Image (cartoon, rainbow, N blue to C red):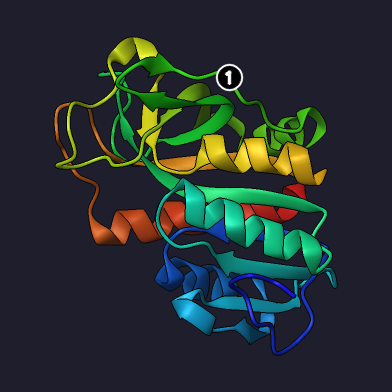
Amino acid sequence: MPTRLRPTSSVAAEAILVGDPGRALLLAQELLEQPKMCNHARGLWGYSGRTPGGRELTVQSTGMGGPSAAVVLADLAELGVRRAIRVGTCTALDPALPPGRLLAVAEAHAWSSGGAGEPMRPDPELAESLRRRLGEDAQTGAVASLDTLHGGGAPAPVEAGDAADMQTASLFSRAQTLEVAMAAVLIVTESAGGEALGDVEAEAAAKQAGTAAAASL
């Protein structure tokens, strides 16, 4: 029995994972024809349906932070998910990364006050497919995954990666254990200097990233 998810309808073998339940609804409406909610337990909204091309796809929210995301991924694997792409957000560490830029993750590592953990990498085939679909609108980079991004101590230094988030390292690590092919694309929602991405722009970037992710699976 899954730990967190309580699906009320079938879950597809391919999934897009997002942290925010609202973004799950946004992408389900954007990517699926007649999406059907398949989970609402614990506020982790999930939707399944067919893409316009006729493929079954699930869009599932994971909640905030690496532990929550890892548990949700394990539940999805138990329910039959075999390929997944994280469409998430990040804060830039590299001053050259502007808000709104899409970052295809080449590696991620857990960051703590003691430094960086071992790099976790995406499934090579799925990551390459995602990079091709994203095209010139994205760049490839490394991500440092922290327990918190705001108000929880010193952030990771620029040397830790191009950007910081809260989930990708945990998802890559758990996916390897579960034998789930996993990749990730992140939206830069805040620059290294503190400039934030607007809501309208963030929604457009999420749709762009989600469309590329769906086509890559």
Answer few, some or many: residues within 10 Å of disc 1's Cα (few below 14, many 20 plus, some between 14 and 19). Answer: some
Count all numbered tags in the image, as a single digit. Answer: 1
The one of 19 and 134 positioned closer to us in this rendering? 19
Apparent side of residue 180 relative to residue 131 in the rendered image (left or right)? right
Residue at image position (76%, 33%) is 123
Apparent side of residue 38 relative to residue 21 in the rendered image (left or right)? right
Q: Is residue 14 visible?
A: no
Q: Residue 129's quadrant in the figure? A: top right
Q: Which SS class for mark 1? A: loop
Apparent side of residue 158 relative to residue 102 in the rendered image (left or right)? left
- Vertical side of 126 occupied by 208: above or below: below
Residue at image position (42%, 64%) is 20
Q: Residue 17's quadrant in the figure? A: bottom right
> On the image, numbered disc 1 is attached to which residue?
119
The one of 55 and 109 positioned closer to us in this rendering? 109
Q: Amino acid at mark 1?
A: Pro
Q: Quadrant of the N terminus?
A: bottom right
- Vertical side of 155 occupied by 83: above or below: below
Where is residue 112? Give x, y as percent.
35, 25
The one of 7 and 131 positioned closer to us in this rendering? 7
- Vertical side of 56 occupied by 87: above or below: above
Where is residue 215? Give x, y as percent.
73, 52
Q: Is residue 199 visible?
A: yes
- Vertical side of 7 occupied by 117: above or below: above
Where is residue 197? Give x, y as percent.
24, 47
Residue at image position (55%, 40%) is 170
